Image (spheres, grey):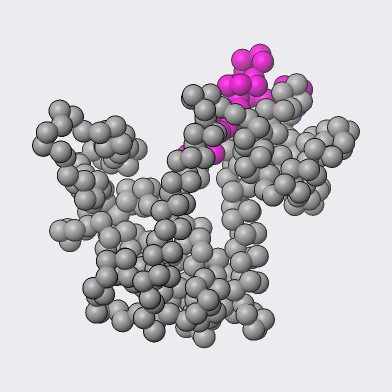
Amino acid sequence: MRLGPRPVALVLLLLCAAVAGAGKAEELHYPQGEHRADYDREALLGVQEDVDEYVKLGHEEQQKRLQSIIKKIDSDSDGFLTESELSQWIQMSFKHYAMQEAKQQFVEYDKNNDGTVTWDEYNIQMYDRVIDFDEITALDDAEEESFRQLHLKDKKRFERANQDSGPGLSLEEFIAFEHPEEVDYMTEFVIQEALEEHDKNGDGYVSLEEFLGDYRRDPTANEDPEWILVEKDRFVNDYDKDNDGRLDPQELLSWVVPNNQGIAQEEALHLIDEMDLNGDKKLSKEEILENQDLFLTSEATDYGRQLHDDYFYHDEL
C-alpha cells in the first residue's frame, strides 16, 4: 500500500517539530544560560497530576523516602555517596524508566492481546494502517521517499529484534526493537545501520566529511557557522579516540547510541560540586538533606519522580 503525500508530510512535519521542540526546550531550560531547576521538575515529573502529587507529599514523607533512596545509592554502606555511586544509580534510573515505557507501549501495540506485537500491529498503532513499501523501487516524491527510507529502517530493526523468527515480538524482543542500545545482540545491527547511512565511500569508517553529512561551506563566508564548529569539536574530542581522522565501528557506536554513562557522570559531578560542603568530593546524608531541593531537581531522583515510585524507595530494591 502506497502512503499518500498528506500522511507522509504530516509524519515529517511531526519529526521536524520534535527537533525544533528540543531547541525550544533548551531555551526554556537554560534561559540566558542560567539553569532553571523548576523546569526540570515540571518537564520530567510528567503530567500535571504527577506534579500535583509531588507538591502534596508531606515533608515528613518526603524525608523518609529520600533517606531510603540515599541508602540505596550508597552501595558500599559507608555513609557517603561518591561520584561512581551517583553515576551508577542515575544510569540504573535511566534504564528502569526506558524499560517501563517500553512495557507500556507493548500493551498498547499488542492489539489482540496475544502477548506478541506483529509488524502489522506496529503499523496500525503508529500509522492507523498497514504500510508496505517496495524495498527496491524509490518513490518520485521526495517526502514519500524520505518516509519510505525511515519505514524500511524500522522494518529491518523489527526483523533483527525478532530472535526466534516468530510471527511477532515478545516483550523482551520489543524492548530490543525500541531500545537496541540496551540489548547486546542488537549492537552489531546498530553499527551496520549507522555505516549504511553515513559511510558513503564504503570503507567501513566514517570520515569527518561523512560525519558532517550534506554540509557545504558557503564560498562567500569567512568561516564555518557555529554548529559546524561544535560538530567538528565533538568529532575530534569526543568520538575519534585514536585521532586517526575517522570513526571506526566502536567509535561510531559512541556517536549513534545515547551515552547515558557520560550524562550520568556529568550529573554526578555537578551534584557533588554544588552540594559538597566540606570539600571531600563525596556527599553525606546531612549534606544532601541540607540541599534537598537541589537533589530533588536532579537526575539522581529523576527530578523527584522516584519519591512516587516504590521501585526506588522500598527496601526490597
Residue at the (40%, 70%) spot, across then down: 6
Q: Give the image location of residue 35, x and y in percent.
A: 56, 27
Left or right: 184, with 215 as reference point? right
**Where the N terminus falls, by quadrant?**
bottom left
Label count reads 0
Left or right: 69, with 28 as reference point? right
Foreground: 49 or 159? 49
Foreground: 68 or 8? 8
Residue at the (51%, 64%) spot, across then down: 178
Residue at the (43%, 46%) spot, across then down: 20
Left or right: 117, with 257 as reference point? right
Q: Give the image location of residue 251, x and y in percent.
A: 32, 48
In the depicted structure, whether residue 169 falls above or below residue 243:
below
Left or right: 299, with 193 as reference point? right
Most extreme residue toward the top, as rendered?
A: 278
**Is 30 covered by the magenta stretch?**
no
In the depicted structure, whether residue 114 falls above or below residue 209:
below
What are the residue bounds of the magenta stretch? 262-288
Residue at the (16%, 40%) spot, across then down: 217
Q: Give the image location of residue 122, x and y in percent.
A: 52, 75
Foreground: 187 or 57? 57
- Residue 205 appears in the rendering: yes
- Residue 237 appears in the rendering: no
**Is 283 covered by the magenta stretch?**
yes
Give the main secondary structure of the magenta stretch: helix
Q: Give the image location of residue 27, x and y in percent.
A: 49, 34
Foreground: 255 or 220? 220
